[in-house]
Amino acid sequence: MSGTTRAWDMKRPFALLPVLATLVACASLERESWLISEEDEVALGEEFHRQLLKEMPEFTGDASVQAWLSDLGQSIVPYSHRPGLAYHFTVVDAPEVNAFAVPGGYVYVTTGLLMTARDGAEVAGVLAHEIGHIAARHGVRALETMMIAQGIGSLVGDETISEVVTTAIQIGTGLTFSQDQEREADSLGTQYAWRAGYNPWAIVRFFNLLHTLEPSEPEDPVSKVLSELGELFSTHPPTTERIENVSRQIREMGVGEDDPSLRWDTPRPLSEVQSLIAAATGRGGTR
Ligand SMILES: [Zn+2]
């Protein structure tokens, strides 16, 4: 636990109250799924990862970029509701601004998102949102519904896991979520980013930025996959509503934009990471 967090705990004892109220409201965080055990979920995640990386290129231009994303993600995980799960954070080499998560602890963000964000706190907010989907088992519930519809009673055997994942990727199940699940992931992500020491107003700033971007028309195969799997534009509640919800939550938490105990950037600033991506891909930012 970092010094920042201890300072936060001592300085804001009353700010915990609205957070606790929100935690109680998230019933899906409390119970395991009945059809997919955590062990099954991890096996599904490994298979998703294997199949997805056949469709989308992992960014390999500079290993320190993957390490930077992984360090940032892992710094948020202890503050989530499933800190014991092994999480994996992967940079996908694609100019689109997008991110998504699959069950079992796998989170993906594009180089386009990293080039467009203004600071590490904005990326922290995106990762925290995706961790929220995993913590609340949103993808697991969607996969269960799909298995029931297809008459699959259990995930015994690698073949079944492979079939379930292939079908899920084809129809986008387990990767995009309902509007209520998006609201829950926003709420959880705001708490997680804040507790990890990042200023949660960065999330509002990133939403405002998203508001100004249009989803690109998918042309090449990777863009097509991303537009189907990436979830920043697809099923979220309208951005203005998300901005209002998250702003209200942060005000209730008593956090100001100028709070000196909270970070706006990562220990290694995002701008350095952007320079590495630009050098490796030849692509600049979209802002
Ligand atoms: Zn989401």
Image (spheres, rainbow, N blue to C red):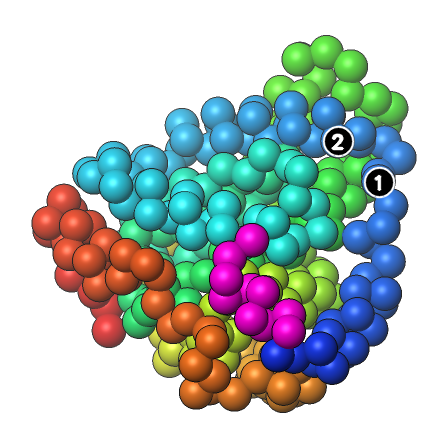
Q: Is residue 9 magenta?
A: yes
Helix, strand or loop under label 2: helix
The answer to the question of whether label 1 and label 2 lie on touching residues, with beta carbons closer than 8 A, is yes
Residue 93: tell me if it is visible. Answer: no
SS assignment for the magenta stretch, majority:
helix
How far from the left and from the top, in percent, is residue 69?
38, 48
Q: Nearer the viewer, residue 95 or 257?
A: 257
Residue 264: tell me if it is visible. Answer: yes
Name the mark on residue 38: 2
Question: Which residue is located at x 23 percent, y 68 percent?
Answer: 286
How far from the left and from the top, in percent, is residue 75?
49, 51
Residues packed near mark 1 inside 10 Å, few (<14), some (14 to 19) or many (20 plus): some
Helix, strand or loop under label 1: loop
Q: Is residue 54 magenta?
A: no
Question: Which amino acid, by three-letter code, is at mark 1?
Answer: Glu
Quadrant of the rendered image containing residue 34: top right
User: For this view, does 204 lie left or right of residue 34?
Assistant: left
Q: How many marks?
A: 2
Q: Earlier in the sequence, mark 1 or mark 2?
A: 1
Question: Which residue is located at x 70 percent, y 31 percent?
Answer: 41
User: For this view, does 163 lie left or right of residue 199?
Assistant: right
Quadrant of the rendered image containing residue 57: top left
Q: Which residue is mark 1?
A: 32
User: For this view, does 6 lie left or right of residue 75?
Assistant: right
Q: CA distance from mark 1 to mark 2?
A: 8 Å
Residue span colored magenta: 1-10
How far from the left and from the top, in percent, is residue 251?
63, 88
Question: Which amino acid, by three-letter code, is at mark 2?
Answer: Glu
What quarter of the picture does the C terminus occupy?
Answer: bottom left
How far from the left and from the top, in percent, is residue 132?
64, 56
